[in-house]
Amino acid sequence: MLDKLKQRIKELLTNKIVNCVIGYEQGDNPTLARPVYITKPNEAERLVYNEYCIPILAKYILKPEVRSLKLEAGKIGIIAKPSDVRALVGLIQEKQIIREDVYIIAVGRKEDFPKIYDEIIETPLSELDAKRKTQDAEQLKQIAEFEKKTPEEKRAFWQREFDKCIKCYACRQICPLCYCRVCIADKNQPQWIPPMPNSGGNFSWNMIRAYHLAGRCIDCGECERACPVDIPLMMLNKKIQQMIKEKFDYQAGLDPEVPPPLSTYQEDDKEKFII
Amino acid sequence: MQITKTNLEQFINELIKSGKPVVAPIRENNLSAYKPINSFNQINLDLPFPTKSAKEYFLADYEKILSYSFGEKGQIEMKEPDQPKELILFGVRPCEAASFPIMNKVFSWDSQDKFYQERLAKNLVITVACEQSDDFCFCTSVGLSPQATDGSDIFMRKTQTGDYLAEGITDKGKNLIEKHKDLFAENSNEKPIDYKGPEKKFDLKKIKPWLEKNFEHPMWNQISLPCIGCGVCTFTCPNCYCFDMVDEATLKEGARYKMWDSCQFRMFTVHASGHNPRDNQSKRFRQRIEHKFNYYPDKFDHTLCVGCGRCIRHCPADMSLLETLITINKLT
């Protein structure tokens, strides 16, 4: 599979269909592959593809340094997992990237991808995706357990979890849908969110992060993975996903043609929330 | 002095009973952290190292540095901040212990940072020599070792039989051993586990001269591309000391807080005009390396890195300080 991938990337670069490909290489961490930009056909040899190819590459397409690599003609290629393609769908919907600027090389099972990729290298269910599916099931169970708690217990749970937060913003920085040029947490005139990692500051930050991703979170799980202090952020994200599904019958990251429910307006929108 | 495992347990429990908070590495769920403990049994000295270093007990992640209120006639009444408590830190790694005096160089330079200095004077550090390291450790490459006693008040080495050899390094440490001397015995012939640490991976002497000359080297752009610009490296680092301040106020009272800040954040260098001299991540990444291995040695004659490996171990995008330094070594 890897040989086929390398071969294909070489072809794409040689034929100038893409100017650059975002993929993974092996770095210092044996359990985490490193995002890499391949611009020359012979560099494709550096590519790896295994269960440690975890960091979401769709995030990297937004980096100014990467955008500048997209020379006059040609596209940016991206070796995409299902979560990468879902993120790209979100970014296209929200007009952060133009579909035609990106060349998507999907790697995985056809049924796991939104149908917007340019080509696919089919593989059986990857270990990474299989692991993610088990994690998903566990988290849904956790949420069901959490729902049984009293409001006081719920608050205490999150207070305890958020107390661990060190305000490193890894959750925001890794999130492919967190692309605001100036994040609300960085606005300091006035300072809307207390910048110190105290209970007020941590609660505001973590709740605002989750709320701002309502109907937009594509469920890649990267915020939770990036968090150095293991805050179960996906519990929040998944709960909100469930609510969006229930209220709007919508799941983010599946179809770029469907407008996201929280950023559209229809005359017959329900107005039950207006008192 | 030699102390048996049982006596060590008693020693720590006596320290806890004496009323001073004792901070040690513990494991909560899967997270390893330095936390105040209630009993010796909570301590976990195994790998992985605590995610956050023990830095927060010297340079608080946030603290109130002053507060004020308006009196009835509108006069300002200032309140002094709370005094830091005396702490005993047990099970600190030699690399982290070494970081405390290094950071003190900047906090006792032109401006005296009494918050840091007071904590450094009050805290007592009991270091335990490492018996193992992981893929990310590189203390030996920055001039330290698992046996380095810099910054420790008491230094402990485990022996083959599970006892510990304790050495009072400072007067503070010696006095504490003296106070509990019934728990310690003279050294027998037992040898400590003499772990030499990870293999040396680069030549520190070559780094600074290269950095001085290569501020604009194309390597910076290339190597920093995976960086996502979060603060994991700087916040888990035992030596990164940059902080920010913010005022919180109502019409009646207010307070000024000091908290960790990170050079990896875009906001770190944004001027009031809107101009940002470090306007991309490659410049911000370069700053971290230059500060630790060029500017700090220039000013304070010491590298601002102890090789604990946290910045690599916890990086969500596998950015590697070590690999950067090895690359620089090869370029020289």
Image: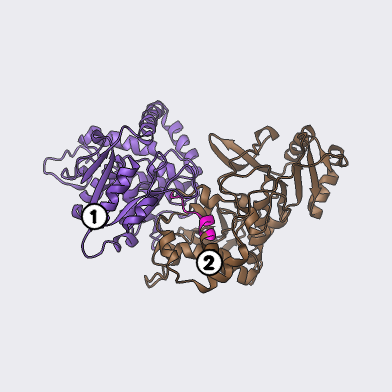
Q: Quadrant of residue A40?
A: bottom left
Residue B217 vs residue A8: left or right?
right
The quarter of the rendered structure image containing the C terminus of chain B is bottom right
Name the residue rendered at 37%, 70% in the picture.
B274
Q: Secondary structure at mark 1?
A: loop
Q: Chain B rendered in what hue?
A: brown
Residue B257 in view of the camera: no
Number of numbered markers = 2
For disc 2, the marked residue is: B290
Residues drawn in magenta: B317-326
Q: Magenta segment: does it hold B141?
A: no
Name the residue rendered at 32%, 48% in the picture.
A6
**Chain bearing mark 1:** A
For disc 1, the marked residue is: A97
Residue A102 in view of the camera: yes
Up the image or down, B203 lies above or below A218; here it is below
